[in-house]
Image: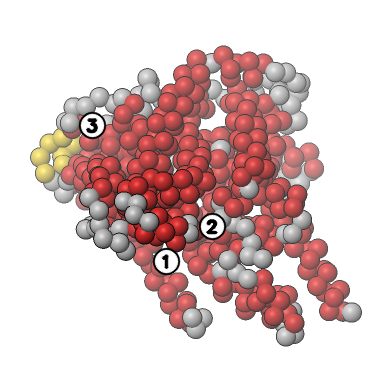
Amino acid sequence: MTRSNRDRWFGHAGRLLVGLILLFVLLPTLVVIISSFSSTSVLFFPPKGWSLRWFERALAYDDFRKGFYAGLIVTAWASSLAVVIGTMLAIAIHRFDFRFKRLLEGVLLSPLFIPHFTIGLGLLMLVAQLDLGRGYALVIFCHILLVLPFVLRSLYVSLHNLEQRIELAAASLGASPLRVVWTITVPLMIPGLFGGWLFAAILSFNEFTASLFVTTQATQTLPVAMYNYVREFADPTLAALSVMYIAVTATLLTLANRFLGLGRVLNVEGAR
Amino acid sequence: MTRRPAFVLWFVLPSALTAIGLTIAMLTVLQYSVRAYVPGSLDVGGFTLDNFQDLLKSLYAQAFFNTVSLSFKTALFGLLLSYPLAYALVRTRTGWLKSSILIIAITPLFLGEVVRTYSWIIVLGSSGFLNSLLLAMGVIDTPLQLMFTQTGVVLALVHVTMPIMVLMLATGLSHIDPAYEKAATSLGAGPIRAFLTVTLPLSLPGIVASLTTAFAWTFSAFATPQLIGGGKVSTIATLVYQLGFSSLNFPFAAALSVAGLVLTILLLTALKRMTRSLNTVGGH
């Protein structure tokens, strides 16, 4: 009896702790949502009045609009190319042997621990030294480098889970290796490909530090435009933009959870 | 492994080119770091080691110290807050509760550093949420100075790194069969003892992975120390940016980056060593 009482007490304390931590995670989001509806340009708590003017300003602000489109261009190219490059490499690494395999893999995974500002700085100095312009190609290449490790990781998981006997069966029935890859391996990898692509796209759209180094006024992505805004203005326009950002992201994640099972995509489903 | 068909080379080619691009960029950093700075010009002078000598100046040494101490604090507090969340996420059986924890815990991951840092500015500012709340409750008489302090930066950085830590810890925890813990409990261990002797040691790989990532992320963080530290908390990242873009001293920025990279590698290697010896102690 005392035993089960103690267990129950631990259960309650644990739930309270988890609740408090969730509150800590949610706190800034809640505060941003409240401030975005404030009517004054200097923030007070609680706000002195309510309005939607910051939403109007955020939508009308030129740099945000341009940043959004530049971000879409960079994200679309970078995440798609990263998935193509990553898939080809993942299949080659997982199924075949070739020279410098470990070295190549190591170099491509290294952006996981090389600080983003170092990668941005290196690319910036490289194009300066080669007298190349800082265009979209540079930003896209930079983003490919940064998201590729995540793409590779998610592709390895799906290749690992793939039933290799199907490939062997196709090969034993006379299909050439390339045909096996194209008709068996790639189609079976589609869920993993989609997960990797989604992950890459979200990371690329939000990448900030390296982008700050490699973008110009013409190619600046949304996070860079937002950073420049905070440095110049203190009004809640950015709070309004953040709220739109949060709403879109949370909706996308909830939908992904409903239809794809986010737990499975992110590999956090419990062992049952 | 099968015999290697010819197309494999073509499959490897794009990634090989990507890797070569990255390698050349990193070599450029290395090369710039040993070049002389020509004030007011983007061109660099001859070869020199002066940049590395300048790193020993107290201002720069302070930035290194700040970066390492921020990284340690963030990783530690991040772990303490992330572990219970990851545990709850993996062990909760109620469907809606599980999805809610997952969505709340990982949405910030997809918001980017700028949005999250901005939110913390509103929370921590002198007329911000926290100060207004504490003033209204009568806990304090004058606003607390949280912006432009290391405490403020650590708070925001913990929040920034938590989602990825929760994910990595949850991945590790999800591969531990709950039956082990049940076995321990049925043999008479209390919930705390079962957790400490069974689940915690088994989740060590996830802990190490999450600590490593938190470390690397904090090292790399720029917007948070820059905006919340407001120049009062300088880190390697904020210094590299200032040197590069305000004074156009790219050689010195490169030297700082190289030193930062060496430091990262040393710290991560030390962390790995430490956990290896921990594993030996644990008898694995």
Mark 1 → mark 3, Cα distance in angstroms: 35 Å
Q: Which of marks 2 and 1 precedes in the sequence?
A: 2
Q: Nearer the viewer, residue B198 or A192?
A: A192
Q: Is residue A173 visible?
A: yes
Number of the label disc, if any, that sits on residue B168: 2
For the residues tagged 1 and 2, is the chain the same?
yes
Label 3 CA crowd tier, 10 Å (few <14, some 14–19, many 20+): some
Q: What kind of residue is marked 1?
A: Leu
Query: Where does residue A223 sit, x and y in percent of width and height?
Result: 48, 30
Q: Nearer the viewer, residue B265 or A77?
A: A77
Work out which quarter of the rendered image holds the N terminus of chain A and state it: bottom right
Q: What kind of residue is marked 2?
A: Met
> Residue drawn at (62%, 77%), measured in percent from left and top?
B198
Query: Where does residue B17 sit, x and y in percent of width and height?
Result: 24, 42
Instruction: Tell which subunit mark 3 falls on.
Output: A
Residue under numbered circle 1: B271
